[in-house]
Amino acid sequence: EPEVTQTPSHQVTQMGQEVILRCVPISNHLYFYWYRQILGQKVEFLVSFYNNEISEKSEIFDDQFSVERPDGSNFTLKIRSTKLEDSAMYFCASQLLPGGSTTNEKLFFGSGTQLSVL
Amino acid sequence: DAKTTQPPSMDCAEGRAANLPCNHSTISGNEYVYWYRQIHSQGPQYIIHGLKNNETNEMASLIITEDRKSSTLILPHATLRDTAVYYCIVGYDMRFGAGTRLTVKP
């Protein structure tokens, strides 16, 4: 079965540093997501991305966050100046069709990047 | 916030059916019901989805009430490996609630 690939699996950074989390969605998918999960808490939606622009974002996705699809295959999440509370598991997901289609499609999730901010 | 309500936890005996309920009373007519699960800290895994008819696949069955205000995920013969947090999601925005932590006991 096709997979969503996330790198790195673990990332340790100092507070205030910039980090880029990388994702390779499934190749024919069109709709992409980032979620985060703080230890012991629920999976939280950050942002969805379609047709090279943000489709929807949550209140968590503030100005320190940005997303990009730089080369048609990678999908990245950048955190400009990390804070201690950004420590979490970050999941990327991709979807064949955008939300709102008549058939709707399931999300495929990557294995996540565990971000630790010290 | 999520548009669904699920019990926070449930137990099930190994080999028995696990029936996980979900309330989604504000569901719109064209919104699908999706079920995912998360084992430990792995990425959530799709299980099944449906609109109004009952659905079955190799993993589970999904029963949606006629008024579509609630649904039940059925794992027909639960195993220890089915211990996970199960999430019911409604609609297009793909937001997760707190889910139900299912513990399958020997």
Image (cartoon, helix red, strand yellow):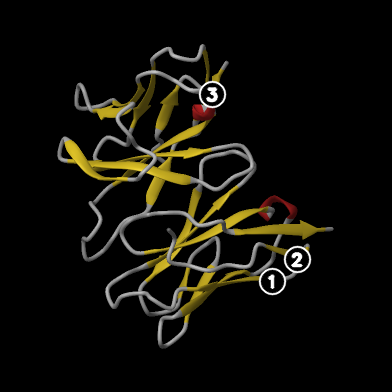
What amino acid type is highlighted by mark number 2? Answer: Cys
Q: Residue at x 74, y 53 (%)?
A: B80
Q: Secondary structure at mark 3?
A: helix
Gap in angstroms between the C-alphas marked 2 and 1: 7 Å
Chain of the residue displaying label 1? B
Q: Check contact, mark 2 vs mark 1: CB within 8 A.
A: yes
Question: Residue placed at 16% from the left, 35% from the top?
Answer: A52
The chain ID associated with circle 2 is: B
Residue underneath mark 2: B12
Earlier residue among tags 2 and 1:
2
Q: Position of residue A34 (x, y in %)?
A: 37, 38
Residue type at tag 1: Ala
User: Viewer-proximal residue, B42 or B56?
Assistant: B42
Q: Which mark is residue B3?
A: none
Horizontal side, residue A24 vs residue B17: left or right: left
Q: Say if B11 sits above or below B30 in the image.
A: above
Label 3 belongs to which residue?
Answer: A84
Q: CA distance from mark 2 to mark 3?
A: 38 Å
Disc 1 target residue: B17
Is the C terminus of chain B in the top left, top right, bottom left or bottom right quadrant? bottom right
Q: Nearer the viewer, mark 2 or mark 3?
A: 3
